[in-house]
Structures are given as C-alpha cells and as structure tokens.
Amino acid sequence: MHLVTQKTPDDAATDWYVRLHSGDVTQSARLEHEAWLAENEGNRERYEAVQDSMRNLAPLDDWMRTEANRLNARVMARRARRTKSLIGGLASAAAAAAVVVFWIATNPAGYYETARAEQREISLDDGSRIHLNSTSSVAVRYSPDVRAIELNSGEGVFDVTRDAQRPFVVAAADAEVVAIGTQFRVQLVGRDVTVTVLEGSVAVFNRPGTRAISGPGATHPEPGSEPTLLYSNDQITLHNGVMTAVESVNASAAAAWREGKLIYDATPLRRVVAEMSRYTAIDLAVADGVPDHPITGLIQIRSPDAMLRFISNAVPVTPVRVSNERIVLHATPAAPE
C-alpha cells in the first residue's frame, strides 16, 4: 500500500497503524507503540481516529464481492471471470472503485448540470449534497449497496452523509475517490483531476483508461491500484493519469466559490482570468504578450465589473471590450516619465 507522507500530527498515527498491521510486527515494535500512545492523549486520539477510518472502509470487501458477482452474471455472462482475491479494506476499495466505474458506464443514471455563471446544490436521498460549480455535470446512481457518482465535467464539492454499509464513490477521468462521511472537492479540467479534502479523509485511486469501457460485453478494469490517503487540507492532482505528490492547501479557499468568492495566492494571471470567465456571461481573455502576473487576493464573483476592477488594480492590465461577447485584458502602457 502506498501511504502519503502527511504534514500534520496524523503522520505518526497513520505510520503506526500500517506498521502494526503489516503482518510481521515484532514485540519490540508493540512496546514502542504503547510508549508512543502513553506520551500524550493526542497520540491516542489520533491513532483511534485512524482505526475508525479503516473500520469504516472494511465493509467495501463484502460489497465488492456482491457487486462483482452481480455484474458478472448480468453483463459479462459470455466472458465470465473469477474476481481476484482481495486483501484488506483499502485493497477492496480499489477494486470496488473499478467496478463502480464500469457500473456507471453500463447503467442509466440521474443527470445534473449547470450552465455558465450558474451554481447548483443537489440534495440526494441519503442526506448527502453535491455543490455543483458552473459549467459542470454529474451522473448519480444510488442503489441499496453503493452510492456512485460520475463527474463528467467541471467541479463539485461532495458533502457525504456517513453510511458504512453503502460506500460513496466519485469517478472522474482516471481517478476514483472513495469516502464514507466526509467533505471533499473534485475538479476535472480536460483529463486532469484535482481532489481536495475539506473534512475527514478519502482514498484516491488511479485508474488510467477506465473511460474506454462502454456497453455490455466490455471487461472492467482489473483490481490492483494502490490508494493514496488524503486528510483535511490535503490535495492531489492526477495529470494525464500520473498522480502528483500530496500538497498541504487551504481547502476552504479552494471551495470558496460556494460563497461567491475566489481566493488566490500568487496564482498566474491567465489561470485566474480563465476561472473568472466561468462566472460571467461574457468571455474574458488575456492578450498575447501580457506577462502572467501572479495574483493574490479575494475576488467577489457576483459582479463581473468588480472582478475586472480587482484585476486592473492588482496588475498593470486594462480591459478592452472587443465585442458584445468578449473582453480582452491588454498590458497597460507605462506612464510617461
């Protein structure tokens, strides 16, 4: 199992859990662990939190077997195969995520989308919510056994009601995110997927090529992908199917659009303007030759004029309306000496 190096006090608790469940733990390691627990109450609380998280993922094992058998009987009768044995809760979660991708691809789903400059909150029947950003779409398929979501475009924040018997899985491009009782953000730009955890923890799986699945008779991906664990204020990106290192971020800032705000910290100008354009009825662009100035600050997205004033005050650019549908930011000429 690949475990992320954490930048919080949860590091030691996670490392101890893996060490004690590795199958070759020594008596001296157990004594060392007891001494670490006795150092302070915080150590014990963090370790118990990790244990609880692992227990919550354990039901995925049974769910995976049931769902795989159902799919094999219904969809793959002519190419039946035995499901590989699954060891451990998170290993099972990896296989479960693969089946969810196949299931979504071959079954009808509820569908929700937003237009440009529109946001939407979707309440699901288990009490979970999806906060859908502009120009975004999701497919939702709930059953008694699994809560499966596919992010087809854009960005969403998923506020998940805990249900250990019914995993909540979000699929987007090459990524699957498994969560039970947490809040996290998934952003899809082209084939790049960014996952940010606001509260709780999630397991992220890399599944290159899963979107090639289409229709009855196709085979689902083999289990085997190792998960990366993310905790509050952790973020990871899958770029062309390659998973980056985990970053420590301000997760609330990443999801501030839900409150009508965009928060930036030394973010390149073109990236800021491209994101701003999602919240206006008019296209915004940066002219060729304008430096990609770093932008830092808070932008209110309810007013296009206010957004453009902020940018013009932050860096030397001037908005020029070139048509009724388009504004281009040009470099502001230097004042004569």
Image (tube, rainbow, N blue to C red):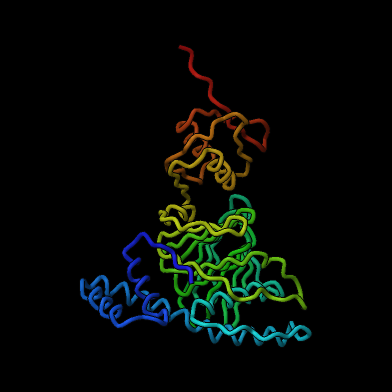
Residue 225, quarter of the rendered image:
bottom right
For the C terminus, the quadrant is top left
| Residue 144 showing in the rendered view | no
Residue at 41% from the left image edge and 59% from the top image edge: 233
The answer to whether residue 191 is above or below residue 55 is: above
Residue 100 versus residue 66 in the image, above or below: above
Q: Residue furthest left?
A: 39
Foreground of the two, 71 or 318: 71
Image coords of residue 294 (percent x, y): 47, 37
Q: Is residue 20 visible?
A: yes
Residue 254 in the image: state x and y as whole percent: 46, 53
- Drawn side of residue 107 relative to residue 231, left or right: right
Q: Residue 209 location in percent, x, y?
A: 67, 65
Q: Nearer the viewer, residue 255 or 63?
A: 63
Q: Is residue 135 above or below residue 209?
A: above
Residue ID at (76%, 83%): 79
Hey, which quadrant is residue 219 in on the image?
bottom right
Residue 199 image point, x, y percent = 41, 65
Which residue occupies 61% across, 31% down?
287
Residue at horizontal 30 percent and vertical 83 percent from the top: 27
